[in-house]
Image (tube, helix red, strand yellow):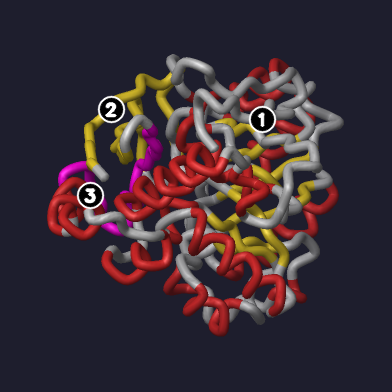
Amino acid sequence: MKLTVQKKFWPLREPFVIARGTYTTSEVIVVELQDAQLVGRGEAAGVDYHGETLDSMLAQLEAVRAEIEAGITRAELLKVLPIGGARNAVDAALWDLEAKRTGRRAWDLAGIGNTREIASALTIGIRPVEAYEKAARELAYYRWLKIKVNNEHPLECVQAVRRGAPNSRLIVDANQAWDVKTLYALGPRLAELRVDLLEQPVPVDGDDDLEAERSPIPVCADEAIDSIDDLARLKSRYDFVNIKLDKTGGLTAALELANAARAAGMRLMVGCMVTGSLGMAPGMVLAQLCEVVDLDGPLLQAEDWPNAIQYDRTGVMSWPSPALWG
């Protein structure tokens, strides 16, 4: 088996502003695994807040190139690479390669099947308060909208979105910008605005006093959850976990985390870093198990892969073509 890795840079439609910073491009690695005439592919952005960069992921892959090219399995991959983007890209390529070898869809290989329609949220990045309503009005036909906020006028931002999109279901994502006191103060007002989910409102190291039952809106762990090892600490503090393949190190580990989280009584969301459709496709397997789906990376980009996933005007995603993945 031959391993090929390259960097790819996707321009974004507009600067993507969140509480952690501003992004104008999506930087990803693309892995190809060739076995005879078959090629499996995977795409990953890594986890920047864990210090991952394109070069660090490439270095990880070069360090285990021999093991991968010897014909590594997905189970073996979990032992030779840590969680993160490098493992995610290889894991996705292995799923794709197995699908091509067997002639079966990745959903069937995972024992899930792809019978449930997947409607993704679309994210509105941080902007002046008055600009939220305009953005929401243009996207009001989406079933789900996700609103990025920080600690400056978050209630007013959500009010503006609700005026612009009176019927959309709303996720509010503060990317750790609030404290627990702010969360409890804003919760009832946000509930009046029919917000469905609060995503990682408080810092990972500042959630000791967070109690899930005290919030009128379900609270979702994002930056706080990477692997099964985090569940014991989180299950009394959060209602949902946001599972991202770049965080777990691939679909294989993500499915294990999803099953463990459900067994612990937690609810599931699938999220993404910003990548093209090749990076979204494995997340659509996991999405079959999740109540909330945020796989909008390609919608934030100005370009995408050939044979890209299509999104209809409400956010419903087409199934990836065999020419793309899985």
User: Dot 1: what SS?
Assistant: loop
Image x and y of residue 79, in percent: 32, 71
196 vs 129, left or right, is right
Provide the residue designation for mark 2: 8
Q: Nearer the viewer, residue 111 or 271?
A: 111
Q: Which badge, 3 or 2, comes first in the chain's sequence?
A: 2
Of residues 298 and 5, which is closer to you in this image?
5
Q: Give the residues drawn in magenta, as a range.
A: 38-55
Q: Which residue is mark 1?
A: 319
Near mark 1 (Cα within 10 A), the count class, few <14, some 14-19 or many ≥20, is some
- Is 50 part of what is drawn in magenta? yes
Q: Residue at x 34, y 62 (%)?
A: 77
Q: Nearer the viewer, residue 183 or 287?
A: 287
Q: Which mark is residue 175?
A: none
**The C terminus lies in quadrant:** top right
Quarter of the rendering containing residue 262 = bottom right
Residue at image position (67%, 22%) is: 311
- Mark 3 and mark 1 lie on one chain; the one further toward the N terminus is 3
**Of all residues shown, which one is farthest toward the front?**
36
Is residue 252 in the magenta section? no
Q: In this rendering, does residue 51 appear at all?
A: yes
Q: Could you tell which of marks 1 and 2 lies nearer the N-terminus?
A: 2
Give amino acid for label 3. Met
Tag 2: Cα neighbours inside 10 Å, few (<14), some, or many (≥20)? some
Query: Is the residue 274 above or below the residue 219 in the image?
Result: above
What is the three-letter code of the residue carrying label 1? Trp
Residue located beneath label 3 in the image: 57
Q: Amino acid at mark 2?
A: Lys
Label 3 CA crowd tier, 10 Å (few <14, some 14–19, many 20+): many
Mark 2 and mark 3 in contact (Cβ < 8 Å)? no
